[in-house]
Image (tube, grey):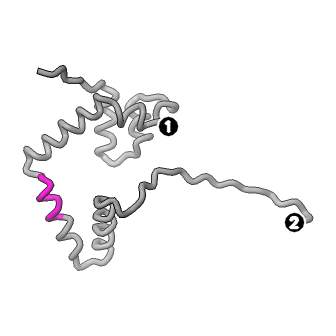
Amino acid sequence: MPNKVKPTPKQRAAFENIKRGMTKKDAMLKAGYSEKSALMAKQNLLETRGYEELIKEYRKQLYDAGITTDVLAEVQAEGLFDQDARVRLEYLKENKKDFGLVPNQNFNLTQVNIELPDWAK
């Protein structure tokens, strides 16, 4: 029997926070991670063996509850034909992400204000 990695309490708390819709950074901060660790969520949480184990457990729970990839696909397909155009648009966005048609948008926007010298005005 392989040695199963147990998620840490912080990993478990961050995972639950992410499931509730929090950003990775906020989820990690609320779980007790430092600001520095939360800024590097990929290395300090998402790629850890404990977190990967949590994902496996969650997938099994979903499957055991009858939520299979077939069910999810059916729901997505139904959403594409909803009467409300806004609902259809949201489902379309999700489908595009699922098929990898939308580039990953993990970036932060930073506003920089530059004051021009008088001669440039």
- Residue 98, image x, y percentages: 29, 59
Is the C-beta separation of discs 2 and 1 under 8 Å?
Answer: no
Mark 1 lies on residue = 39
- Residue 41, image x, y percentages: 43, 37
Query: Of helix, strand and loop, which one carries label 2?
Result: helix
Frontmost residue, 7 versus 34? 7
- Residue 80, image x, y percentages: 23, 73
Most extreme residue toward the right is 119
- Total residue callouts: 2
Q: In which quarter of the image is the C terminus?
A: bottom right
- Residue 61, image x, y percentages: 13, 41
* Residue at 49% across, 37% down: 39
Indicate the amino acid at tag 2.
Ala
Q: Give the range drawn in magenta.
A: 68-75
Query: Of helix, strand and loop, which one carries label 1?
Result: helix
* Residue at 19% across, 69% down: 77
* Residue at 39% across, 39% down: 27
Q: Quadrant of the N terminus?
A: top left
Mark with earlier residue (2, 1): 1
User: Toward which corner of the image does residue 53 lie, by quadrant?
Assistant: top left
Frontmost residue, 6 versus 49? 49
Residue 73 located within the stretch drawn in magenta: yes
**Which secondary structure class fits the magenta region best?**
helix
Cα distance between the residues tagged 2 and 1: 38 Å
Mark 2 lies on residue = 120
Indicate the amino acid at tag 1.
Leu
